[in-house]
Structures are given as structure tokens and as C-alpha cells.
Image (spheres, grey):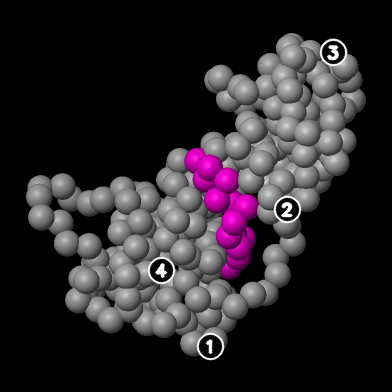
Amino acid sequence: MLTSVQNEKVKNWRKLKKKKERDLHSQFIIEGFHLIEEAHKSDWDIVEIIYQQGIECDPAWSTYPLFEVSDNVMVAITQTKSPQGVLAVVNKKEIQTHPIQRALMVDRVQDPGNLGTMIRTADAAGFDTVILGNGTVDLFNDKVIRSTQGSLFHLHVFEADLTKEIDRLQQSGSKIWSTGLENARYYNELDVPEKLVIIVGNEGSGVDPHLIQKADQNVMIPIYGKAESLNVSVAAAILMYEAVKK
């Protein structure tokens, strides 16, 4: 059992709380039985599993290196208020080109809960891809990961230059819908294209005007009450589910 927070391995686990260390080592930490099970069932590479003394691990996890730690070590490495006493270190995946049928493009969304919810909703709505633009909260932020509820492991999710991605996807036959008011049409008045990419933007400023100009169509959601706007994750959910209805 590892009992000291000064242990070199424990120090390395703690470092993964920081984005620069996650980027440096191409690894991140997930917490809880559900997320570990989702990673285990996926094609993501679990490096090792850390469990608190007294916690029973799933026998199926015995194929991974297992490290038992004391209560004080678990407190030092966990990032949740009510930890389940089990964590895993996972390798990031390299970006691979793949066919895209339905994709969500995320421009500078800052709130981890919003991003995680959108990834989870994209999974539920049958989208295959989520593309994160520069300035978007880190995909491997612990709050983002928890909010995805494991959907991170079901989709192609990657970071990219959105301008270049729009060009690439349009060349491959995808139509781009951007959320915005200028020259916009209500989403429910439009025919949904066979291959569709939906862009949603920053909570305060929306989608970057340059990206809006490159889109094939600006879309908006009708508001029947007095609210000025919708939360970005709610707007994304409405549009994604509309896309799969057709």
C-alpha cells in the first residue's frame, strides 16, 4: 500500500490535475466506478487503477496494474467532494481521420459542465463526433469528464482549428449550421442535410463571426417566452435532436 503523498508515483498522479502535465504526459485521471467501467469497455488505454484501502475493485480490472493507497493519499489525488475511492490513469488517444456524418463543433465554450453535457447529449443523440476549437475548456478537465458520464469514451472527440475543419468538412460534403441571429432561419423550417455539422459558441459572445461567415446556414431557436437566450448546452441539445429526427 502507498501511504505517503511524497511517494514519487503519488506525486505524478497529483501532477495530472494540471493541464500542462496532462498535455506533457498525454494522460489524464478519471474517478469513480462508472467512468472506469466505460473506459474499460472502450478502446481507450487504461494505464493503471488506484483504489483506496477497503475498496473492492471489479475482478475484470485485474488485467491492469492496481495500486492500493491509504486514505490520506486518496484525499491528495482525488478531485471530487465525495470520492468513491477508485481512480484510473488513462492515455489520451491520437487524433485519427474518420468519416463524419453528424458532428458538433464547439467554439470557445468555457464552462466545464456545459462542455461535458454537450458531449453526453451528442452521444445520446447519435452524433459521431465533437470537435473542440481553440479557447474551449480542456476536454480532460475533471469536471468536463464527470459531466460526460462516460460519453467521452463513446465518441470521436478532438481539438482542432475550426476554420480548417470547416473547410475540410465542406470539401467532404458536410453542410455547416452555425448558431447566430444574422441572416438566420429557424431550425425547424429547414431540411436537415445528410451530413451535418452544428457550431455552437461561447456562453457570452456566441460563435466567432469568422466561423459564422464560413457556415452554410445560420440557425436560431424560437423563443416563445421572455427569456433572451438559451444556455449553450440546451441550444445544442435541441439542434442535435432535431438533426436526428430527419
Where in the figure is residue 109, as x and y percent of width and height? Answer: 45, 51
**Magenta-colored span:** 147-161
Q: Residue at x 68, y 53 (%)?
A: 42
Sequence-first tag of 3 and 4: 3
Quadrant showing the C terminus: bottom left
Residue 3: mark: 3
Residue 44: mark: 2
Sequence-first tag of 2 and 3: 3
Residue found at the far front of this picture: 59
Sequence-first tag of 1 and 4: 1
Q: Indicate whether 70 appears above or below 155.
A: above
Tell me the kind of residue under disc 4.
Ile
Residue 12: mark: none
Residue 236 location, quadrant: bottom left
Q: Nearer the viewer, mark 4 or mark 2?
A: 2
- Disc 3 is placed on an element classified as loop
- Disc 1 is placed on an element classified as helix
- Disc 2 is placed on an element classified as loop
Q: Indicate whether 91 appears above or below 201.
A: above
Q: Is residue 160 magenta?
A: yes
Q: Name the residue under label 4.
A: 198
Asked whether residue 61 appears in the rendered view, the answer is yes
- Disc 4 is placed on an element classified as strand
In the image: residue 157, left or right of residue 105: right
Q: Is residue 86 magenta?
A: no
Q: Distance between the residues labelled 4 and 2?
A: 26 Å
Q: Which residue is drawn at 58% across and 67% down?
A: 161
Mark 3 packing: few (<14 Cα in 10 Å), some, or many (20+)? Answer: some
Q: Nearer the viewer, mark 3 or mark 4?
A: 3
Q: Which of marks 3 and 1 is in front?
A: 3
